[in-house]
C-alpha cells in the first residue's frame, strides 16, 4: 500500500479582470492584488495593496493629486506635499495655493540680449535691471551683472579698436 493521495484534477481557470478596480489578473490569483476584491466582486478579507509601490489604476479629478494607494477602509492615499508649522502633514489634494518664488526680471533678460547685440543699450538696461531687482527681490541679478560686464568689455574693446585703427591710418598717411 502506498501513501500517495489520489490524483485530483483541478479545473484550470482563465485570467480575469477585477470588478472593482479593473486590474487584469492571472488565473493563479483568487483575489485582486491591487484592491483585495475576490473573483466574484466581494471584498476579500486581506488587502494585498499594503506596501504597494506603483500607483493603482485610480480616479484622478482635475486639481487633485493622483491616488497612490488605498487604506484597508478604501480611503484614498495621496502623496505628501509638506508639513505645516503646527506639524500637520498636508497631502497634495489639500493644497489650496502653491507659492512660487519671485520670477525672472524681464529687464535683465533684455539687458543680456542687448549686451550681445548693441552694448550701449545693454549697459543702460543692465543698470536699470539691477536697480529693479534690488527693490523687487526678483531673480536675474547675475544675468544683469553679466550683461553689464559684457557690455562694458565690448565697449572698451570697440574704443581701443577704433584708436588702433586711427593710429594705423595716421601712420600710413604720414600724419604724425
Image (tube, rainbow, N blue to C red):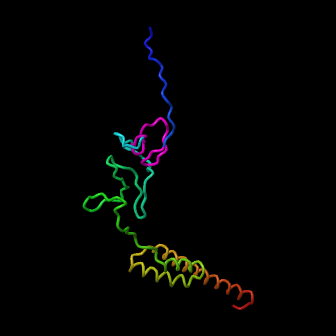
What residue do we see at 32% from left, 59% from top? 90
Q: Percent position (x, y) of residue 4? A: 45, 15
Reply above or below: 152 against 1: below
The quadrant of the picture occupied by the C terminus is: bottom right
Percent position (x, y) of residue 101? Answer: 40, 70
Looking at the image, residue 99 lies above or below residue 11: below
Please indicate whether residue 33 sits to the left or right of residue 112 in the image. Answer: left
- How many marks can you see? 0
Queried whether the magenta region covers residue 19, the answer comes back as: yes
Q: Residue furthest top?
A: 1
Taking the image as shown, residue 104 lies to the left or right of residue 91, namely right
Toward the right, the furthest residue is: 173
Q: From what the image shows, is residue 98 above or below residue 70?
A: below
Q: Which residue appears at 61% of the width and 82% of the height?
A: 158
Q: Is 168 displayed left or right of 43 in the figure?
A: right
* Residues shaded magenta: 17-39
Q: Point out the residue furthest to the left here.
A: 86
Q: In terms of image quadrants, where is residue 165?
A: bottom right
- Residue 37 versus residue 169: which sits nearer the camera? 37
Relative image position of residue 19 (x, y in whole percent):
44, 46
Q: Is residue 14 above or below residue 136?
A: above
Specify the principal SS of the magenta part.
loop
Residue 25: x and y in percent read: 48, 41
For the residue pair 13 and 137, the one nearer the viewer reads as 13
Quick one: quadrant of the N terminus? top left
Q: Nearer the viewer, residue 70 or 138?
A: 70
Amino acid at each position: 500500500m502506498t501513501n500517495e493521495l489520489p490524483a485530483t484534477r483541478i479545473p484550470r481557470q482563465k485570467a480575469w479582470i477585477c470588478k472593482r478596480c479593473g486590474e487584469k489578473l492571472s488565473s493563479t490569483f483568487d483575489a485582486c492584488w491591487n484592491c483585495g476584491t475576490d473573483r466574484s466582486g466581494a471584498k476579500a478579507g486581506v488587502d494585498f495593496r499594503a506596501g504597494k509601490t506603483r500607483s493603482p489604476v485610480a480616479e484622478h479629478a482635475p486639481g487633485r493629486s493622483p491616488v497612490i494607494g488605498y487604506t484597508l477602509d478604501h480611503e484614498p492615499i495621496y502623496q505628501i506635499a509638506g508639513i505645516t508649522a503646527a506639524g500637520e502633514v498636508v497631502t497634495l489634494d489639500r493644497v489650496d495655493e502653491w507659492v512660487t518664488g519671485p520670477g525672472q526680471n524681464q529687464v535683465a533678460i533684455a539687458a543680456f540680449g542687448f549686451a550681445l547685440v548693441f552694448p550701449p543699450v545693454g549697459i543702460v538696461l543692465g543698470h536699470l535691471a539691477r536697480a529693479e531687482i534690488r527693490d523687487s527681490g526678483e531673480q536675474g541679478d547675475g544675468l544683469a551683472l553679466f550683461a553689464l560686464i559684457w557690455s562694458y568689455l565690448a565697449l572698451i574693446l570697440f574704443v581701443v579698436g577704433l584708436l588702433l585703427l586711427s593710429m594705423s591710418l595716421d601712420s600710413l598717411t604720414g600724419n604724425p
